Image (tube, rainbow, N blue to C red):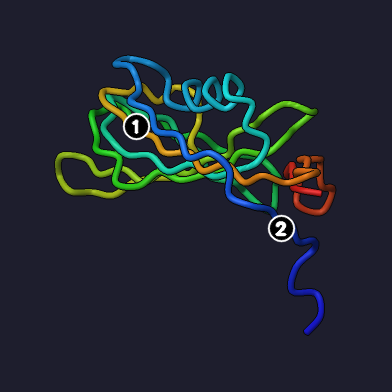
Amino acid sequence: MTNLYFKKWEGRPGRIIAYRLSYGVDLLGALQGIAEEEDIRFGWIKFLGGVKKAKVAYYLQDRKEFIAFDLDEPMEILSGMGNISLKEGRPFVHAHVTFMNREGKVLGGHLMEGTVVMAGEVFIQELALPAPPQRVYDEVTGLYLWV
């Protein structure tokens, strides 16, 4: 089997850290701040809770750009997940999220700044590697991908 993946990293489990987020903080900003404060160089994030409003994005592959959606209503976070890796030598959070509004409608996408926390709980699992992946710009996709 060839060309199934570009590159493989193998490490060992590192710290597992849990947080309760503060009321009114920006969700992506809080996740990014935690990653930087804890100097997490590679790992994954899971989170849940509720938001006062949200901003998500969808990537237009043919145009190589994100379009953003403002979801200006209180919602539950059904599932939030992402990863932390290095971009320009600093911890960088990439996260996706699924919400449910009061009518039971499910919405989601790429988490953007502008998502305001009502209540939030976060788990981060660090993966210890001698040389964690770096995000660099990929001409083919227009995204910053691991190398």
Give left or right: position of 104 versus 12.
left
Dividing the image into 4 quarters, which one contains the N terminus? Answer: bottom right
Instruction: Give the residue pinned by disc 2.
Output: 10
Q: Amino acid at mark 1?
A: Leu
Q: Is disc 1 surrounded by few (<14), some (14 to 19) or many (20+) residues within 10 Å?
A: some
Q: Residue furthest left?
A: 103
Please tell me which residue is depicted at 80% across the width and 43% down the height of the picture: 131
Residue 95 appears at what percent x and percent y?
52, 40
Please tell me which residue is depicted at 32% across the width and 14% down the height of the picture: 24
Residue 136 appears at what percent x and percent y?
81, 40
Please tell me which residue is depicted at 31% across the width and 29% down the height of the picture: 120
Q: Amino acid at mark 2?
A: Glu
Residue 37 appears at what percent x and percent y?
58, 19
Q: Quadrant of residue 140?
A: bottom right
Element type at marker 2? loop
Vertical comparison of 18 with 2: above or below:
above
Residue 39 appears at what percent x and percent y?
64, 26
Please tell me which residue is depicted at 31% across the width and 26% down the height of the picture: 53
Give left or right: position of 79 versus 14.
left
Instruction: Please tell me the numbered disc located at residue 140.
Output: none
Comparing 16 with 137, the one in front is 16
Give left or right: position of 5 versus 27.
right
Q: Is disc 2 surrounded by few (<14), some (14 to 19) or many (20+) residues within 10 Å?
A: few
Element type at marker 1? strand
Vertical comparison of 32 with 23: above or below:
below
Q: Nearer the viewer, mark 1 or mark 2?
A: 2
Instruction: Give the residue pinned by disc 1.
Output: 71
Q: Residue furthest bottom?
A: 1
Comparing 69 with 80, the one in front is 80
Give the mark nearer the N terminus: 1 vs 2. 2
Vertical comparison of 24 with 144: above or below:
above
Q: Residue furthest right?
A: 139
